[in-house]
Image: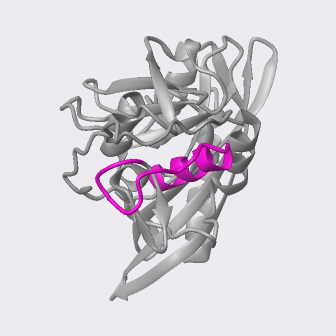
C-alpha cells in the first residue's frame, strides 16, 4: 500500500512539470493549475509533494486511504521566482495495487446563516494604525498550522483572517454581543470573527475599530488586505483570504486556511471550489 501511494505521488508531481501532452484522464488539479498559470504567463519549474496518511481501512482486496499532501511549487513569471504552497486532503481506493478512485475531500461545511452587519453602536472612535507587516508575518507563520492561543474551527478560514488582522493591531470591539462588532474573548466570539459572510458585511460597514474600504480591482490592494469569495455567485460569501505578496504583474498572492495555502494567486481558478459564477469583494484596511 505504501509503495502504491508513493507511486501515486510521483506520478502527480510529474504531471505538473511534464511537457508531454496531457490526456483527459490526467490529474485534474495539475490541469487546472497549469491552465491558470498559462493565463498569467507563469510556469511551474519545480514541484515537491510530501504526504502523510490520515486513516486507512480494508474491505477484502479493497484498501481505502485518506491522506494529506503538501505541495510546494516553484513559480517563474517574467524572470521572477516565488514559491506557492498548498495542502490538500484526498481519499483514494486501491484494488490490490490498482488505483480505482482518488478524489479531493470537501472540507467546507455550511456556515451559520448570520447576516449581522456592524452598526455604529455609538462607541468611542478607537484610534489605531494597521501594522501590515505584522499581519503578513502572522499569516505566514500560521497558514498551515493552528495557533494554540486561539480556538480552531472546522471552517477556519475567517478565524485565521481575523487572527491575522488582530496581529496587525486592529482593535476588537462589541463584546459580548455576537451580532455586533468584531471580537474574540473568553471562548466566545462575534459572528464577524468566524463567519465568512459576516466578515464580508462587517468590513465596509464598521464605523469604529477595524474598518475597510472596498476597491474595484485586486491590483489596488496592499499587503495585509482582504479578499472575500462567493464561490457560487449567489450573494453569500464562503471564503476569505489575506494578501501576503504580489506577482510579477503586481497582482495579489494570498494565504488562507481550511484549504491551507500560501502565496496562491488571488483568483482561485485552480480551486475545486471555483465556478464560472464566482464573485469577489476587495477590501483595503483603513487606519483608525
Q: Establish if 23 lies above or below 251.
A: below
- Corner quadrant of residue 253: top right
The answer to whether residue 143 is left or right of residue 23 is right
**What's the residue at 66%, 56% (across, down)?**
142
The quadrant of the image that shows the N terminus is bottom right
Q: Establish if 139 lies above or below 9.
A: above
- The answer to whether residue 217 is magenta is no
List x then y, in percent, for residue 222: 64, 22
List x then y, in percent, for residue 35: 49, 23
Q: Decide which of 223, 254 is in the foreground and name it.
A: 223
Q: Decide which of 47, 119 is in the foreground and name it.
A: 119
Q: Decide which of 5, 279 is in the foreground and name it.
A: 279
- The answer to whether residue 173 is magenta is yes
How many numbered marks appear?
A: 0
Can residue 7 be seen by looking at this rendering?
Answer: yes
**What's the residue at 25%, 25% (across, down)?**
277
What is the magenta range? 158-181
- Corner quadrant of residue 94: bottom left
List x then y, in percent, for residue 285: 56, 28
Can residue 272 be seen by looking at this rendering?
Answer: no
Q: Decide which of 138, 278 is in the foreground and name it.
A: 138
Task: Identify the image's colour scheme: rainbow, by chain, secondary structure or one colour.
Answer: one colour
The quadrant of the image that shows the C terminus is top right
List x then y, in percent, for residue 113: 19, 52
**What's the residue at 44%, 61% (across, down)?**
90
Amino acid at each position: 500500500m505504501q509503495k502504491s501511494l508513493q507511486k501515486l505521488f510521483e506520478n502527480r508531481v510529474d504531471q505538473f512539470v511534464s511537457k508531454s501532452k496531457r490526456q483527459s484522464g490526467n490529474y485534474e488539479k495539475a490541469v487546472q493549475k497549469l491552465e491558470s498559470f498559462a493565463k498569467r504567463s507563469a510556469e511551474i519549474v519545480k514541484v515537491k509533494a510530501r504526504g502523510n496518511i490520515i486513516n486507512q481501512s480494508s474491505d477484502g482486496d479493497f484498501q481505502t486511504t485518506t491522506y494529506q499532501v503538501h505541495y510546494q511549487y516553484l513559480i517563474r513569471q517574467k524572470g521572477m521566482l516565488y514559491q506557492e504552497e498548498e495542502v490538500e486532503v484526498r481519499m483514494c481506493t486501491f484494488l490490490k495495487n490498482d488505483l480505482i478512485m482518488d478524489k479531493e475531500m470537501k472540507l467546507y461545511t455550511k456556515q451559520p446563516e448570520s447576516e449581522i452587519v456592524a452598526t455604529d453602536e455609538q462607541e468611542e472612535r478607537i484610534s489605531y494604525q494597521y501594522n501590515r507587516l505584522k499581519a503578513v508575518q502572522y499569516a505566514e507563520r500560521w497558514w498551515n498550522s493552528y495557533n494554540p492561543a486561539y480556538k480552531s474551527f472546522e471552517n477556519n478560514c475567517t478565524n485565521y483572517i481575523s487572527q491575522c488582522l488582530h496581529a496587525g493591531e486592529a482593535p476588537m470591539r462589541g463584546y459580548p454581543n455576537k451580532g455586533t462588532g468584531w471580537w474574540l474573548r473568553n471562548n466566545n466570539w462575534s459572528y464577524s470573527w468566524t463567519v465568512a459572510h459576516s466578515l464580508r458585511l462587517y468590513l465596509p460597514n464598521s464605523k469604529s475599530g477595524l474598518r475597510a474600504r472596498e476597491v474595484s480591482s485586486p491590483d489596488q490592494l496592499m499587503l495585509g488586505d482582504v479578499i472575500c469569495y462567493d464561490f457560487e455567485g449567489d450573494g453569500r460569501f464562503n471564503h476569505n483570504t489575506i494578501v501576503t505578496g504580489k506577482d510579477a504583474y503586481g497582482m495579489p498572492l494570498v494565504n488562507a486556511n481550511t484549504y491551507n495555502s500560501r502565496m496562491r494567486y488571488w483568483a482561485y481558478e485552480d480551486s475545486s471550489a471555483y465556478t464560472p459564477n464566482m464573485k469577489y469583494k476587495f477590501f483595503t484596511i483603513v487606519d483608525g
